[in-house]
Structure formats: C-alpha cells, structure tokens
Image: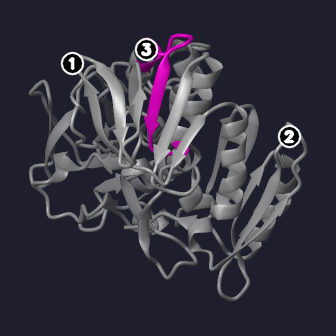
Amino acid sequence: MEHVVIAGASVAGLRAAEALRTSGWAGRLIIVGAEPYPPYSRPQVSKQLLTGQRTVAETRLPAGALDAEWILGVQVTTCDLGAGTVTLSDHRRLAFDGLVAATGVRPRRLPLPGHELSGVEYLRSADDAARLRARLQAGGRLAVIGAGFIGAEVASAARKLGCAVTVIDPAPAPMSAVLGDVAAGELAALHGAHDVDLRMGRCAVAVHGTAAAEAVELDDGAVIPVDAVLIAVGSVPNIEWLDASDLDLSDGILCDSRCFVVGSDDRIVAAGDVARWPVVGSGGAAARVEHWSIAGEQGAAAGTALAVGRALSVPFESLLRVTSRQHGASLAILGRPAAAHQVDTTISSRPGKPRFVARYLDSSGRLVGAATLNANAELAALACELRGAGDSMAGAA
C-alpha cells in the first residue's frame, strides 16, 4: 500500500492518519476535508463556538508531525473503486490503494413552508455556529425545532447569551427518546427553571416572514415570534460520493468489526458518524453511532487496521459514552439506553441542583445503559458494571 486518501478531516480522519503513521506505514498520505479548517473540537460547535467564548483556532486538535498533504475546503464527490480514484469538487482526481471513509454527517433538512427564509439555520460546523451566533443577540428570540442533544444544548447556550428561547418537539420532554420519560422530565424541569419555553407534544408547521423568519406556526395554531430558527431534527450520512459503488450504503457505510468496509476487498475502512457497524450485545445489528469520543477511537482503530491488514487487526470495541452541559448541569449517558426493557430512575434533586441516576435494563435484568445528571461520581462504577455485562460497541460492516 503506497497511497492512502482520507476522506474527511474531522476527528475520525485525524486519528486514522495518526494511527497509520504510528503503525509504521510510510507511504503518501492525503487528507481531504470539506471545511476550510484543520480538525477542531466539533462538540464546541453547540457550546463555546456558539457563545463566542472560543474561536475555531482555539479548539483546533493537535495534529503533530503527520507528514500528510492537507486539502481543505474541498469535498470528495465521487469514488471509482475499480480504478482506485476519488474525484474532488475542484475536479482534481486522487489515486489510492487504501482509503479511509470518514465523511461524517450533515443536518437533516426539514422542508417546512418558509424554510428558505433568512434566519432559518442548521448547526454542524464552525461556520454554522458563527452564522447562528450573529443572530443570537441579547433580547433576541430563538425557536429551536427539535429537542435532542443539539437542540437542548443550543437552548442552553442561547439563554446564556440572553435570548428568549422556545423549544418545539412532538416528544413529551427533551431527549425522552434516549432518556425515558422520568429522566427526561427532570431535564425538562431544568430547562423550565432557566426560562426556556418548552412546547412539547407540538410540531412546527410553517415559518412565516417576508425576507427573513419572523414567526413559527405550530400545529395547535400558536404563532411564536422569532428572530431566528434553528432546525435540529437529526442527521444524514455523507455517502453520496460512493453511490457508484456496490457497497451497502443504507444509513451509512456498512463495515465489519475491524472497520473494513464490507465488499471493499479490505482496501477501504470507515470510521466516525458515517460508519455503520454491529453493536456487541444486540445480536450483531449494525448501527451508526454519532458521538465524538467513539469517532476518534474508531478512527484510530480504522487507521491501524488499514496499516497492518486484516490478519493482524483486532475488533474495535468501545463503551458508548456521551456528555452534555446544559444550563450548568452535567448530563452523561453510557451504553445503550434505547435497548432497555425497563428503566430504574433515582431522583435526588435539591432546589437549584437537579440530580438523577437512571439504570437501563434488558429483559433479563442486565444493565445495558445508564444516564446521570449532576452525578458524575456514579459514572465509574456504572461504566465498570456495563463493561462487566459485556455492553460494548464493536465496529462493524
């Protein structure tokens, strides 16, 4: 293997590049990134980059001496697996005999009437954060459509900036699909205590305005005046550049437990949000996992596998974990709460200090996930119990 192209210059691509070099591979390495910036801490997009507390340069990830060629601000548009080439949006063509697919995801679009108005935003990149921040002036009015991770974190950041915030979602409480009703109810109380107007159980049906967004209409007829709208209703994997291949691209790039893309003759590995791989303990069902820490770890595993080959590679396994700061409270989620048949939630909140520990159990009573709010001291024991129960995430496809 003499020429490796890494499609994607976020944390998964960076860690893959580092792993290739530390594994002793010394060939030509080209990293292609759609954004004009070197790899930076993407979780800060909905946190300190949005509030303006840090700049992109201040969140840059150390890259070290990679001996790599960087092509930034350019997308990979097509791939010819037979010829071993990728074509870029600037019409350059790059040859490879090894390829890392780490192109990530993009926000899912919501085709509401009025979605094309100025002030209707999505959030994924540093530039998205800068554009939204410019609209979040103190006293401004923001409607957030979607109460998942991004929606909840943006609501917190916007309140910190002095904005009036309304969150709209058909679910009964923020993040209830992940946390369950009881824990999500505590999260709803946290947002309510910080004057976020929660319109749960409701759907946005239109955005109104002339040139710019001025109001959001709900399915109950309510009309909410706004200065900006954030749509945060999930993501779509960036896989179109592989459409001409025969690879399995249903909801991501299918890869096996060693990160090799299925059907690629072990010339291609995938990592990060775009990769779909089986989950240990779930009967081998493949899924995408959109979490920063997993993307970095999987990128490193993918780079190592590509460097050493299948015979010397090992399965990628990692305990799923994600953290979030909302209104100063620390939320942590471990494992796979969505796989639970039963949820045991212990609430020990005090005035001004919400707190819960939720344990998610399968049908046999085995722990498959956990979530805590302001209970970080519990995390180590929960993680140990989950690892002992065999609830880890394994790269697939």
User: Camera-side residue: 97 or 259?
Assistant: 259
Check whether the beta carbons of the residues at disc 3 and disc 1 lie within 8 A of each other: no
Toward which corner of the image does residue 338 lie, by quadrant? bottom right
Q: Position of residue 377 (x, y in %)?
A: 88, 50
Residue 228 % position (x, y): 40, 22
Q: Is residue 177 left or right of residue 239?
A: right
Query: Residue 17 got which mark?
Result: none
The stretch in magenta equals 132-149
User: Which residue type does callout 3 highlight?
Assistant: Arg
In the rendered image of this protein, does residue 260 appear above or below residue 34?
below
Residue lying at 63% horizontally and 64% vertically, measured from the top left: 180
Q: Which numbered tag is attached to residue 135?
A: 3
Asked if residue 143 lies in the magenta stretch, the reply is: yes
| Mark 3, secondary structure of its residue | loop
> How far is mark 2 from mark 1, CA to CA?
43 Å
Residue linked to disc 2: 353
> Residue at label 1?
210
Amino acid type at image mark 2: Lys
Q: Position of residue 82 (x, y in %)?
A: 10, 55
Residue at x 42%, y 65% (from the top left corner) = 287
The residue nearer to you, when weighing 64 against 50, is 50
Looking at the rendered structure, the number of numbered marks drawn on it comes to: 3
Q: Is residue 124 visible?
A: no
Q: Residue at x 50, y 26 (%)?
A: 40
The nearer-to-camera label among 3 and 1 is 1
